[in-house]
Each structure stands twice: as structure tokens, then as C-alpha cells.
Amino acid sequence: MIEEQEHLPCDGYIVDGAVVANESMLTGEPLPVPKVAVEKYDGAKFTAKNMVYAGTLCMQSTGSHLGHAVMVVTATGGLTTKGQLVRMVMFPQSVRFKYDDQLPIVYGIMFAYAILLSVLYFVLTDMGDWIVTVMQVLVSVLQSLNPMLPVAMVMGQTVAAKRLRNHHKIFCLQPERIPVAGKISVMVFDKTGTITKDGMELSGAVPVEDGTFSTRIDLSRTPEGDKLCGSMSVSDKVAKSPLLLQYGLAACHTVTSMRSGRLVGNQVEVAMVEASGWALPEVGSAEMVLTSPDGSSQLRVVRQLEFEHTRMTSGCVVRDEEGRLIVIIKGSYERVQAGCKASAVPRDYVEVCEGLSSGNFYVLGMGYKLLDSGLDDGAVLKMARDELERGLSLVGLLLFKNEVKPDSALAINMLREG
């Protein structure tokens, strides 16, 4: 059982309930990460969405077992992800430099040079005594093949590491990396959110009706002053958009709500949920039921399709109040186009998508298809994902932007001026 506000002592997979974890200790990302239980059907596979890691903080735990999530332990101690990370830091992999690989070649050339000198001394010189000649040859060999060269290099690196520790409080586990650092002239550091805002913002949507693009819907945030003057809010604009687009914004995500009301998940999906205005279920609810802003409509999420890098898509299967069973898929516009029926894709689809991308928009495609409403939840869970993502009709395009912070231009100019 996973307790809230405690650091997990081991790695494991969630088998019941859901968890919101702070994984900044492992990843450096400050945003909480939602974790869910593995789907309950034959052949279900564990994924990263089901795994929690040792050392991470459980911020929220919900489930049927005394109100908490339950996990099965897969690794403890040094076998955990945290333990492997510590071992990697304490005992980093050795680095083979080009110099080390070429050192035998250098010694081979010097050895040939020493042999040539020896032959020349014995054949072309006369020092009066053979002992003197032998001594001269040995001196030449020692000068050509200095056995102290590797020792001298190691000593130099060790002394450099000691100076770094004593004078600059910098500890180096592998002194042989120091010469490489000496060749660096410029070092650039970057951090997500330094120049741009922390997350994506939903700027608009382009619906598709009867195989052609409709008028673009502006979903950028309305300033408070404009709201007072009667301008529509983002959720009001979404409410006037096509119904399937509303369903996609409201349900096609894996966002979790915390008890404080904070939304946790992928920033693109958080922007979608906030724009839709639909309400997520209460924390600890057994079913995923979404409610429209005016409370007149509900959607029940039957199955969530998590994002997969190989597919470049994510999605869900929902059942509306009319009993329709709807598959909604979103992802890169190329992959969504590949999953749609040819007749459902506008002829200028690629041109429009590329034009929006060149306008600094992050473009996602969205498609849907209807399943037999007589299917029960178990049958939907067992359906292959390839089958769900095939034969779609295009809903439209979602346009996101990561806006630059207001003070970024000033900061960049100051850096340029030194």
C-alpha cells in the first residue's frame, strides 16, 4: 500500500488505484507525474505510466484498498533505478579517448625508430669498444621508449584533480577527463522554461467538416479586461465548436486532478482540459466520468490509450449519454493522417499543416471513429490498439504555442552585450 507524503522505498508497478509522484529527485523535472494502475485484461503490459520509483515522493494516493493505491515491488536497494543512478555516479564507465587508442601505434613507430638507431650504431659507428656501443644503443632505446610517459600523464591528471578539489571544491571521479575539459572554450547551459513560459498554450483549432477545413477557431486566452467588456472566454468558444472536438479536448488525455484542484499531467493535455472547461471526476472516483461546464452532458471514459513514442499518438474510448461508443485519437498530424480514411482527409491537409508549423505552431491532429454501441467495457479493453487507430475520420487540428516570456528579449540582449 502506498502512503501519501512519504518517499517510496522501492521500485514497483501499481496494480490498483492511482498515484501522483514527484520524480524531481530522479529526473530534475519539478512537475508532478500521474501514475495509474495497469489495465485489467489478459495480455495487458506494464508501462512507465504504471511504474513508481524508489526515492520519489508520493503526493497523492487513491485506490480501493483503504483509500490508497497498491503496488507490487520489483526492485529494492541497489537494484532500484535510484540505486543504479548512484552507482553510475560513484563508478562511472571508463572513457576511451582517441589518444589511448593511438598510443600503441606511437609506441610501434618509436620502437622501429629505436631499432633503426641500434642498427646504425652497430654498423656505422666505431666507439672503440663494443661495451660503449651497447650502452649508447640502450640509452637511445630508453630515450625513444620512455617507460615513464604513462606514469607522468597519470600524475599530471592526479595533481590537476587535487588542485580542483583544494582550490575550487570540485571533485573529479575520473581525472582522465580533465584534459578534455581543458579543450572546451564555450559551455552553454539550458533549462526548460528559461526563455519560454513553463507550458504550452492552446491557441486555436481548425475543425474538419465533410472532408474540408472549416474556419479556424481562436482559443487563445482572453485578457481579464476583455472579459469585462463582454468577450467570450476560451471555454465558451469551445462550447460553440463541433461536439467531437469538445469530446476530444475533454477526454483525450491522462490528466489527473489533485485534491487542491491542481491539474497534473502533460502540459499540452493540461492546456486542453483547461480550455475545454469540462470537469474531471472527484479524487478517488471509481469511474472516469467527465462533466460539461453547464452540467448538461457527461462522458464516461472506458479506456485510455497512453502516448507511445513509436506510434506518436494517444487517445481514449468514451461512451456519451446517447450510448455511442467513440474512439478519439490525437497525435502528430502525419500519424493521424495515416490512420484516417482517405475520403475524410482534405486535399490540402499537408499544405495547411506545414503552413501552420512554419508559423511556430505545434500542430496535433485529431481523429475519431464509432464502435458498435453494443460492445461492453471488457471487449473494448481487449481490442488491439492497431484496430482502434484504423479507419478514422478527421476531427480537425489543434494548435499550440509555447510563448516567450516578456523579459526574455531583454535578457538575451544583456547576454550579447556581455
Image: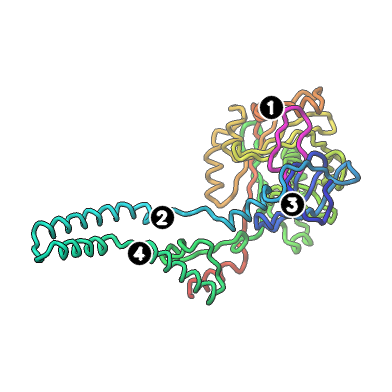
User: Mark 3 or mark 4: which comes first in sequence?
Assistant: 4
User: Mark 2 or mark 4: which comes first in sequence?
Assistant: 2
Tell me if residue 327 comes above or below residue 90 in the rendering: above
Q: Which mark is residue 393?
A: none
Q: Return the residue at label 2.
A: 97
Q: What residue type is labelled 2?
A: Phe
Q: Where is residue 272 in the image (x, y as percent from the top left)?
A: 72, 47
1 relative to 126 in the view: left or right: right
Q: Which amino acid does label 1 sit on?
A: Ala
Q: Residue at x 46, y 70 (%)?
A: 160
Question: Could you tell me which secondary element the residue under label 1 belongs to?
Answer: loop
Q: Residue 234 carries which label?
A: 3
Q: Return the residue at label 1.
A: 384
Estimate how packed mark 1 is, as few (under 14), some (14 to 19) or many (20 or more) residues with alpha carbons within 10 Å. Answer: few
Tell me if residue 72 comes above or below residue 84 in the rendering: above
Whole-angstrom CA distance, mark 3 to mark 2, is 56 Å
* Residue closer to the observer: 360 or 116: 116
Q: What residue type is labelled 3?
A: Val
Whole-angstrom CA distance, mark 1 to mark 3, is 35 Å
Q: Position of residue 377 (x, y in %)?
A: 81, 28
Question: Could you tell me which secondary element the residue under label 4 belongs to?
Answer: loop
Identify the magenta region: 36-52
* Residue closer to the observer: 112 or 346: 112
User: Mark 3 or mark 2: which comes first in sequence?
Assistant: 2
User: Mark 1 or mark 2: which comes first in sequence?
Assistant: 2
> Nearer the viewer's eye, disc 3 or disc 2?
2
Tell me if residue 356 comes above or below residue 388 in the rendering: below
Estimate how packed mark 4 is, as few (under 14), some (14 to 19) or many (20 or more) residues with alpha carbons within 10 Å. Answer: few
| Circles 3, 2 touching at the beta carbon (< 8 Å) | no
> Nearer the viewer's eye, disc 4 or disc 1?
4
